[in-house]
Image (cartoon, rainbow, N blue to C red):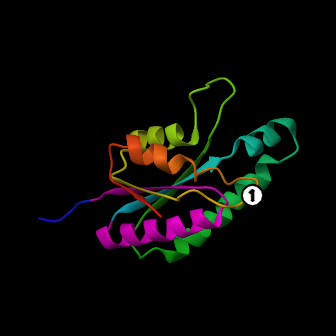
Amino acid sequence: MGVELDLVLAPVDTSDESERAVDYAVAVADRYDANLHVLHVLDERVARGIETGDVTAESVAEEHRAFTDRVREQLDDGIKLSNSSAAGFSAQRLTQTPGSVILDAADELDADFLVVPRETETDKLDATLGKAALYVLEYASQPVLSV
């Protein structure tokens, strides 16, 4: 009897490390015939920029659609892809961090496996997941691959 996975969760931002991590998530989903959910985690500066009007929600949504389309092209037939987005930080909920957002999403989606990028060395505006990897590795109830 082998490992059974129904859903792989891949939290992403705009970092190169995030794109590499989603490649691994696609490979895991393909290998285990599991579905894949891409969670776009917004950096605090991007979320604040949307609120102030410095960043348009449509431009962020378009970037997410383009990323999701690239992921879809990599998947084998029969693998379902879903996606969502969440703010990694909140001024109202001080306990809301990228790590907690990822774990909450994993629980809500009933994810069986997580693939997260390691700490990033980029200064891109929306590169927030690298610091969340250790938190996710420490507290996730699901298996986690950090790449």
Q: In which quarter of the image is residue 32?
A: bottom left
| Left or right: 8 in relation to 44 | left
Q: Relative to 6, is 82 on the left or the right?
A: right
The answer to whether residue 98 is left or right of residue 37 is right
> Which residue occupies 86% across, 36% down?
52
Q: Which amino acid does label 1 sit on?
A: Asp
Residue depicted at x 41% and y 48%:
137
Q: What stretch is highlighted in magenta?
A: 5-33
> How many marks do you count on the picture?
1
Residue 41, how many percent across, how many down? 61, 48
Q: Is mark 1 on a helix, strand or loop?
A: loop
As drawn, the residue found furthest toward the top would be: 92
Q: Name the residue under label 1.
A: 123
Q: Is residue 24 magenta?
A: yes
Q: Where is residue 9 in the image (x, y as percent from the top left)?
A: 44, 54
Q: Relative to residue 137, is residue 3 depicted above or below?
A: below
- Residue 63 located within the stretch drawn in magenta: no
Residue reaching furthest left? 1
